[in-house]
Amino acid sequence: MLKQIGANTYVLRGGSNIGFIVCDGSAVVIDAGLDKDAARRAAKAAAELDARIKAIIITHAHADHFGGAEALKKRTGAPVYASSFEAVVIENPVLEPLWLFGGALPIRSLTNKFTLGKPCRVDVRIEGDELSVEGIKLKVVRLPGHSPEQIGIGFEDTLFCADAFFPIETLEKHGIPYCTDLDAALATLDAFVKGCFPYAHFIPGHGEPLEDPVPVAQANKGRLEQIRDVVYGILAIPSREHAILANTALLLNMRFRDVVHYYLCRTTVYAILASLEKQGLVEVITDEDGVKWRRRIQGPSLHQ
């Protein structure tokens, strides 16, 4: 369903939201959905708005946000924009399942359309904090954490905020939200909690548009901090990585739904381990059977 949010901003609700900025018959699309069906829906929505799509901006390189980009580009001829790091993945989407599987050729379960999007050439690398498309002046807001160079797009009183946070029901369903950089994700969420973004409307990549993102951002921040504390608690006993993940799920009272869910959760746990190591709280050691993680014997405390 297409819903107007601000005077010139709209959202096409779906599994992944697609945003629209419309001025004088020109439309900027924010994210392209999962596949060619999402692209078809986006093109239809633009027609309903009596607007021609002039640009497709991808907030981050996850298949559910860029999988429809190539089909939408073919339909409209509009150039595709993305930040530099995310552009590399959009053009080489095998990188997403590749890093989920530790850098090796991914297994079949990680090559469905939810983890392996259709490749699309990115025409413009977004470098600065401002962007102009057909005279439409946009603000580029850096929102790293969920993905390394995730961006949001601000226009007038609306911020399209990508996957900076998830609906509370999604947190409850998935248990462990996907995160590639814990410290960056917490900083991004903290910025929402502190009201650093002066907008009246917030359109996330998933879920309903919000006027006040603080409660949801707080819930997301609290969830990541809870998982971090659980992992740190587990490491009172030196543990192997598979045991850390299994015990984290056990202590959070959750189960892995399928292979993809397992590897997504593993990435977040790895992000937590990297954060704890950077703070000098934990270390990785080797023995005859591989590697273990443990708390540092003489190191700072987690909540020091």
Image (cartoon, rainbow, N blue to C red):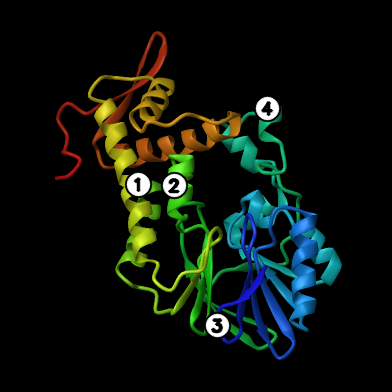
Q: Which residue is mark 1?
A: 223
User: How far across and down, in percent of the image, does residue 214 sit?
Assistant: 35, 65
Q: Which residue is mark 4?
A: 107
Q: Which residue is mark 3?
A: 6
Q: Name the residue nearer the viewer: 146 or 165.
A: 165
Badge 1 element: helix
Q: Name the residue nearer the viewer: 170 or 245.
A: 170
How crowded pointer 1 is (Cα within 10 Å; few <14, some 14-19, many 20+) is rated as some
25 lies above or below 205: below
Give the image quarter of residue 296.
Answer: top left
161 lies above or below 200: above
Image quarter hosting the C terminus: top left
Residue at horizontal 74 percent and vertical 87 percent from the top: 25
Q: Nearer the viewer, mark 1 or mark 4?
A: 1
First in residue order: circle 1 vs circle 2? 2
Q: Residue furthest top?
A: 288
User: How far across and down, in percent of the image, does residue 69 sit?
Assistant: 74, 60
Q: Which residue is mark 2?
A: 171
Residue at horizontal 25 percent and vertical 30 percent from the top: 233
What is the CA distance from the residue labelled 1 to the residue labelled 3?
Answer: 30 Å
The kind of residue tagged 4 is Ile
The kind of residue tagged 2 is Leu
What is the CA distance from the residue labelled 1 to the residue labelled 4?
Answer: 29 Å
196 lies above or below 134: above
Residue at horizontal 39 percent and vertical 8 percent from the top: 288
The kind of residue tagged 1 is Arg
Badge 3 element: loop
